[in-house]
Image (spheres, helix red, strand yellow):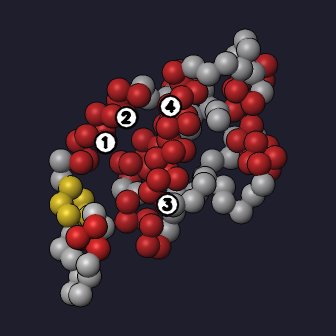
């Protein structure tokens, strides 16, 4: 959830209800979680995560194996999603357009020798 949903008064929100902007903040976190396979702050309990978000902390850019997904452009878009000012966040339409452009370069990876995962919908993918 976005910081203004946790602490509406501090962030200029009247009631802490979900908005298009708070949904875009959450969408950025969902994209991060889908690509890393982990929640945004995996080593922290819920209360610690809320405190981090309200205090302006954001997830760190992944490194090593999972970093391959996080191009500078994608990471920049995610950082925009997490802007502390809701009106600075991209719209869901802008995020969708960005993801659609990136998906045009999608190519399935060939199966590894002896890998049967392609037969059941597995396998990998790459973007060029």
Alpha carbon separation for disc pair 1 and 4:
14 Å
Nearer the N terminus, badge 2 or badge 4? 4
Left-right relation of 39 to 31: right
- Residues tagged 2 and 4 counted as in contact (Cβ below 8 A): yes
- Spatial CA distance of label 4 from label 3 is 18 Å
Kindly identify which residue carries mark 2.
95
**Which quadrant would residue 93 be assigned to in this image?**
top left
Disc 2 to disc 4, how far (Cα)? 8 Å
Residue drawn at (72%, 12%) of the image: 14
Q: Give the structural element (helix, strand or loop) at label 4.
A: helix
Give me the disc on residue 36: 3
Residue reaching furthest to the front: 120
Q: Which residue is mark 4?
A: 24
Residue drawn at point x = 71 percent, y = 63 percent: 43
Number of marks in the rendered image = 4
Foreground tag (2 vs 3): 3
- Viewer-nearest residue: 62 or 17: 17
Secondary structure type for disc 2: helix
């Amino acid at each position: 959830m976005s910081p203004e949903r946790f602490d509406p008064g501090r962030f200029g929100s009247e009631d802490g209800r979900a908005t298009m902007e708070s949904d875009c903040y959450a969408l950025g976190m969902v994209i991060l979680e889908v690509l890393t396979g982990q929640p945004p702050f995996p080593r922290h309990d819920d209360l610690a995560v809320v405190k981090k978000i309200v205090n302006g902390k954001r997830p760190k850019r992944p490194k090593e194996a999972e970093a391959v997904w996080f191009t500078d452009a994608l990471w920049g878009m995610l950082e925009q999603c997490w802007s502390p000012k809701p009106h600075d966040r991209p719209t869901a339409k802008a995020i969708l357009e960005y993801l659609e452009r990136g998906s045009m370069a999608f190519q399935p990876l060939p199966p590894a020798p002896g890998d049967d995962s392609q037969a059941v919908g597995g396998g990998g993918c790459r973007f060029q």
